[in-house]
């Protein structure tokens, strides 16, 4: 699944190109692209027709457009949620080309006149129209909106490390709860959202924390360092357009991200750590491929005491 920098890159592209546009027609080219709507594609098309894409918003790895009766309306009623799955992407066209073979849905827009296609090669992604509900903490729903609203399906998702409204102290405390390995906690989107397998490995490497260290054994200082590390690696990735290992992830103009050239841990098993020179290791932890430095990120032991233990 695309992680925060990839989704934010898509959000920024959509915000710059199609904010305020009105949906004049929706065509669903694969029924499974529209889910959780009893009436299927026909109901989906009827619900979005005539509504304006008021704002594009992201919380963690979750993306949606606020749908309003009028462009710029500050009282949107619905959200068009876009679950990108493993390979979902949007393409914006100034004309009406023949649909790409992986195009699953097409929105015809007016003001500006554009065609917005949702492509999904692996077909795990989908679109959904749902109500907006108040945020649990009363803050903005996510990046891109001042409103304390978010889709009902995202209400349980925590704020991400790049969210200005994130309470760092509370987030650090949440990271230290329980006996799960810290990487599993980082991947739990209800604690701090946005991190997936790639950036979790990168943040742990930068913070010098072993991925299997129990959450309760992470010091308060290390938890804060880990949050800062998550900000740094995702911020750098965002500046470079996200991470791309194949042709599936592209932004709205069809250009791939290239942060993979700058990864320090993920995918580098057997290569020297750029910090200490030790060969990086790879192991499957919790069903996920995990990479770390055995020297910089020491395994935790209940018997070990002192700094870095």
Image (tube, helix red, strand yellow):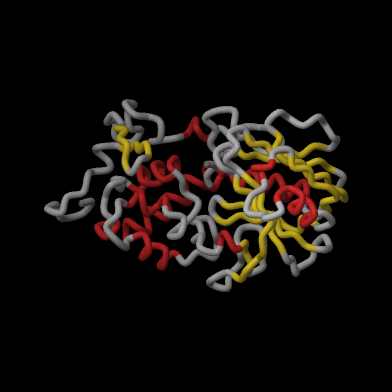
Residue at 33% from the left image edge and 52% from the top image edge: 182
Vertical comparison of 8 with 119: above or below: below
Q: Residue at x 47, y 34 (%)?
A: 262
Q: Residue furthest top?
A: 270
As drawn, 126 above or below 65:
above
Q: In this orientation, which residue lies closer to the viewer: 44 or 203?
A: 44
Q: Position of residue 28 (x, y in %)?
A: 74, 42
- How many numbered circles are shown? 0
26 or 293: nearer the eye? 26
Residue 210 falls in image quadrant? top left
Of all residues, the one furthest to the bottom in this rendering is: 138
In this orientation, which residue lies closer to the viewer: 297 or 196? 196
Residue 226: horizontal and vertical position, in percent? 38, 53
What is the x, y in percent for residue 193?
A: 48, 55
At a point 52% along the width and 43% down the height, the residue shown is 236
- The percent position of residue 188, horizontal first and vertical second, equals 42, 54
Q: Is residue 275 left or right of residue 138?
A: left
In this rendering, position of residue 198 left or right of residue 284: right
């Amino acid at each position: 699944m695309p992680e925060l920098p990839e989704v934010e890159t898509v959000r920024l592209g959509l915000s710059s190109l199609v904010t305020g546009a009105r949906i004049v027609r929706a065509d669903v080219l694969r029924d499974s692209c529209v889910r959780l709507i009893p009436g299927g594609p026909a109901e989906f098309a009827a619900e979005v027709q005539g509504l304006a894409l008021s704002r594009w918003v992201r919380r963690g790895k979750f993306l949606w457009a606020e749908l309003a009766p009028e462009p710029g309306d500050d009282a949107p009623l619905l959200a068009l949620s876009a679950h990108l799955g493993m390979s979902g992407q949007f393409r914006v066209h100034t004309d009406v080309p023949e649909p790409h073979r992986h195009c699953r849905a097409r929105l015809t827009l007016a003001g500006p006149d554009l065609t917005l296609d949702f492509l999904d090669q692996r077909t795990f992604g989908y679109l959904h129209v749902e109500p907006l509900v108040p945020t649990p903490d009363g803050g903005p729903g996510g990046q891109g909106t001042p409103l304390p609203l978010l889709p009902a399906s995202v209400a349980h998702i925590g704020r991400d490390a790049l969210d200005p409204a994130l309470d760092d102290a509370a987030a650090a405390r949440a990271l230290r709860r329980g006996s799960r390995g810290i990487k599993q906690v980082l991947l739990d989107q209800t604690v701090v959202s946005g991190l997936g397998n790639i950036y979790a490995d990168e943040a742990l490497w930068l913070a010098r924390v072993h991925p299997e260290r129990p959450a309760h054994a992470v010091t308060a200082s290390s938890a804060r360092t880990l949050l800062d590390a998550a900000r740094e690696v995702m911020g750098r990735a965002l500046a470079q357009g996200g991470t791309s290992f194949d042709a599936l992830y592209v932004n709205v103009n069809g250009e791939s991200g290239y942060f993979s050239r700058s990864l320090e841990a993920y995918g580098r098993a057997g290569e020297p750590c750029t910090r200490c020179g030790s060969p990086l290791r790879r192991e499957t932890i919790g069903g996920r491929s995990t990479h770390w430095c055995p020297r910089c990120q020491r395994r935790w032991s209940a018997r070990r005491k002192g700094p870095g233990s």
